[in-house]
Amino acid sequence: MEKTKRFLLSEKEIPEQWYNIVPDMKNKPMPILHPGTKQALKPEDLYPIFAEAVADQELNQTDRWIAIPSEVRDQYKHYRATPLVRAYSLEKALDTPAHIYFKNESVSPVGSHKLNSALAQAYYCKQEGLTHITTETGAGQWGTALSYATKAFGLDLTVYMVKISYEQKPYRRSLMQTWGAKVIPSPSNTTKAGQKTLSETPDYQGSLGTAISEAIEVAMQTPNCKYTLGSVLNHVTLHQTIIGLEAEKQMALAGEYPDIVIGCFGGGSNFGGLSFPFLRHTLTEGRKTRFITAEPASCPKLTRGIFQYDFGDEAGYTPLLPMFTLGHTFTPANIHAGGLRYHGAGTIVSQLLKDGLVEAVDIRQLDSFTAGVLFAQTEGIVPAPESAHAIAATINEALKAKEEGTPKTILFNLSGHGLIDMSAYEQYLSGKLQNYALSDEDIAKNTDKLEKII
Ligand SMILES: *Cc1c(COP(=O)(O)O)cnc(C)c1O
């Protein structure tokens, strides 16, 4: 019989609702707190920063299903449904009995899953009558996605881009400018947070934490302007569940159900987006599936961080979030998987990890690129350095399945392609890339500084 390689859905089969996992969780995430009063925040408290609709979604613990606005679905049709692909060639190269599937989010016009939430957030800002939004970007994936989305819905966008990425990834910057965004390297002189950082460390290369502080400051001071975030928060992961809901239908077309679901982990949105729709069957029907996050060994909040209330940004402008964290003052090494250089983890995944419902593994930089190159040589797609972490974790599980002689079904998320990250591959191929080791003292330096609220 001829083998099916790609499992495809028609436009009509694009899901009409996102899935909110919180109503199905026995232990809900702990509340997010006002940093001054330590009181639990209500949606209204978030309105000054975020679009009201997404602030409501952020704290929604009752509605399992949230309708996707038809304007957003129309935009999704530019690239969705994305293919589910059986990685036969990778399986063969590994000589594994495992069945490996991947959801290919790299086919979006911006090259990553980030567009799924960018379109939703831009739509809600427009609906609310805003004219301008701000954001930050690390490697440039979120800024790129939001540039596309703000152009689609007719809004102005200012992006604070981590300075090292601004210099290392000029093509992402150009992509954002092509879609009409204003891009400013962070730290910058345009905000108080940026000026403070520059006065303390004039040659600071920037971090997501600083860039978030700058973008929030501008949003709070500009009329008709709000801030958006591309990871970490619950509403972002909610929008990303379109990935897992499609994958669920596509796995059914393949006649399989995953034993293991894997995603790389920055703040948790692509991992949660793929895994929560499957996790719902674990929570409500007791299905046995393992859910594995793959994070960089140089930024190991899930495998080596602490569970504590912490700020989402470096300057401490955000509310306090209950999460696994390395401390908001932690500066990750300059690995090429820029989207994974973040000190904390989303509150839902943090709670799920605490409850033993998800697992975490850490991947060293060189191992991620070895896996990425093998994937390119077998399945043909050059993965984003971030996604290569999920591939490395998948390969480890497939090799374990071979050792044990068990035909596991593994599903991972290809969160993006790496065609704009070729300078990273160039360094890997010429032997210039390194691993970064963190001692327990390195980690304690920042986590010890956190106020012990729990
Ligand atoms: C941003 C990004 C990530 C990490 O963010 P999550 O919210 O953890 O998904 C992973 N892969 C790619 C391609 C990204 O752009």
Image (cartoon, rainbow, N blue to C red):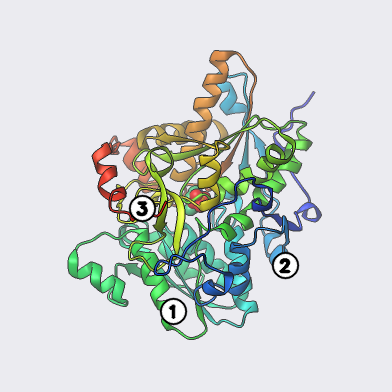
Query: Which circle, 1 or 2, is nearer the viewer?
Result: 1
Q: Is residue 415 above or below residue 440?
A: below
Q: Residue at x 51, y 52 (%)?
A: 347
| Residue behind mark 1 | 220
The image quadrant of residue 310 is bottom left
Distance from Cα at disc 3 to Cα at disc 1: 29 Å
Q: Earlier in the sequence, mark 3 or mark 1?
A: 1
Q: Earlier in the sequence, mark 1 or mark 2?
A: 2
Residue type at mark 1 is Met
The image quadrant of residue 259 is top right
Residue type at mark 2 is Pro
| Residue behind mark 3 | 452
Q: Residue at x 67, y 49 (%)?
A: 82
Can you tell which mark lies on residue 324? Answer: none
| Quadrant location, the N terminus | top right
In-front residue for pair 121/444: 444
Residue 361 appears at what percent x and percent y?
45, 34
In this picture, residue 153 sits left or right of residue 305: right
Helix, strand or loop for disc 3: loop
| Residue behind mark 2 | 69
Helix, strand or loop for disc 2: loop
Q: Residue at x 50, y 76 (%)?
A: 226
